[in-house]
Structure formats: structure tokens, C-alpha cells
Image (cartoon, grey):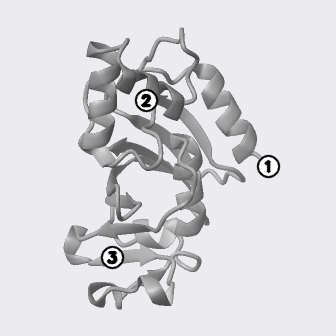
């Protein structure tokens, strides 16, 4: 089986940040996590989990670490064991993916389609919007960066933002940036 998912970073607009990916059904949620990390440009530095309460199912999938366990998360499913096929077979078509407890990035995941075709590797097929940098204090921090670079591009704070984003001094910030070449690079890595 293969599944096509649209994944959108919640809380961001103008532009929205989203990716559409194809994932093999036999992929574990740990591997799905890695696909999301790569497709969005995250650095895989923080805790993650998948959640769904669809169809009366309460699903909480993540990597167990003793020091990360909260009381509410004791009834979890191990991300290295649970497959996409198994969750979809329960009628789940919408999940959320949470990344980084401090910045609290929430990604809405919607199943767009499925087919019997077996595929070996995941693939990113389209997307839009530049992913925020790690550690920017979540949605509000990223919106502030966009505001500073748009409204006060010559300020000291804008220079600090450019350094943090590894931008050249004369480089213009484009939050819509997600070129075809980036999709090709993502897919090259996913195919290995």
C-alpha cells in the first residue's frame, strides 16, 4: 500500500507551510517522523509524537524515553513498532504530529488518497512555504521574524535574524521559498 498525505504546519499563514508526501504503508511511524523532518527541513533535535482521536480511537504514538514520559502519555504506542497501514486500517484519516515541546510545532496530517501499489521509498511531491528555523520560539517567534525582516529590514534586529537564518547581507527574505530543486534534493535523500 501507499498513502498520500498533506501535512500543514498549524498556526502559520501568509504563507502556509505545507508538504504533500507519499509514504509506504509498511513504514513505521518512526520512519514517517523522519520523512516529515526531511520534508520540512527540521533538524530532528526534539521530542515528537503523533496523535489522533478520530473514530473513537485515542492514538498516542511516540518514542519512549523514561525521562520524557508524562502521566497522560503512559498509554502510548511505540513509534518504532506501529505502522501506517495499521493505523489507516482503523479508519484514521487525520492525525497531528507534534514536534519540539518548547516551540510546540503542530502539523496537521490529512490522508488524501491510498492505493494498492507497493512502493519502496517515500517521496515529497509538492509543498509551499519556508519552514521556520529550529528554536525560534514557535509560531509567534517565526511570525515576529517575518515581521522584522519585512517591515524593518535594515534594523539591528533584522541583521540578527539574517545571521540566524544563515542569510547573506544582501539576500532578500522570502517566506514562500520552496523551490522544485529542494523537492528533488529531499527525494534524493529519501530514495537512499
Q: Which residue appears farthest toward the left when viewing the image?
A: 56
Q: Mark 2 or mark 1: name the one nearer the start of the chain.
A: 2
Q: Is residue 183 above or below residue 104?
A: above
Instruction: Give the mark toward the camera: 3 or 2.
Output: 2
Q: Is residue 11 left or right of residue 1?
A: left
Displayed quadrant of residue 54: bottom left
Q: Quadrant of the N terminus?
A: bottom right
Distance in Å between CA atoms under marks 1 and 3: 30 Å
At 42% from the left edge and 70% from the top edge, which residue is drawn? Answer: 87
**Location of mark 3 (residue):** 59
Q: Do the residues bearing badges 2 and 1 touch, measured as CB atoms within 8 Å? A: no
Camera sees residue 40:
yes
Q: Is residue 19 above or below residue 121?
A: above
11 or 160, nearer to the observer: 160
Across and down, in percent, residue 17 comes to: 37, 34
**Location of mark 2 (residue):** 161
Across and down, in percent, residue 129 comes to: 41, 27
Q: Is residue 16 left or right of residue 11?
A: right
171 or 120, nearer to the observer: 171
Element under label 1? loop
At 27% from the left edge and 33% from the top edge, which residue is drawn? Answer: 143
Across and down, in percent, residue 68 comes to: 43, 82
Q: Is residue 70 left or right of residue 87?
A: left
Element under label 2? helix
Camera sees residue 128:
no
Q: Is residue 78 left or right of residue 120?
A: left
Q: Which mark is residue 192?
A: 1
Amino acid at each position: 500500500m501507499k498513502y498520500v498525505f498533506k501535512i500543514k504546519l498549524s498556526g502559520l499563514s501568509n504563507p502556509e507551510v505545507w508538504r504533500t508526501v507519499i509514504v509506504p504503508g509498511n513504514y513505521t511511524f518512526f520512519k514517517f517522523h523522519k520523512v516529515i523532518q526531511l520534508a520540512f527541513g527540521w533538524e530532528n533535535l526534539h521530542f515528537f509524537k503523533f496523535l489522533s482521536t478520530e473514530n473513537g480511537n485515542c492514538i498516542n504514538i511516540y518514542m519512549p524515553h523514561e525521562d520524557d514520559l508524562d502521566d497522560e502519555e503512559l498509554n502510548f504506542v511505540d513509534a518504532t513498532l506501529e505502522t501506517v497501514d495499521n493505523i489507516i486500517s482503523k479508519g484514521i484519516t487525520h492525525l497531528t504530529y507534534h514536534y519540539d515541546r518548547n516551540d510546540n510545532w503542530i502539523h496537521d496530517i490529512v490522508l488524501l488518497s491510498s492505493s494498492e501499489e507497493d512502493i519502496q521509498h517515500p517521496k515529497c511531491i509538492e509543498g509551499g512555504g519556508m519552514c521556520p528555523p529550529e528554536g525560534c520560539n514557535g509560531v509567534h517567534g517565526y511570525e515576529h521574524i517575518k515581521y522584522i525582516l519585512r517591515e524593518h529590514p535594515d534594523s539591528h534586529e533584522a541583521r540578527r535574524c539574517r545571521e540566524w537564518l544563515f542569510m547573506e547581507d544582501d539576500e532578500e527574505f522570502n517566506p514562500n521559498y520552496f523551490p522544485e530543486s529542494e523537492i528533488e534534493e529531499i527525494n534524493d535523500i529519501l530514495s537512499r
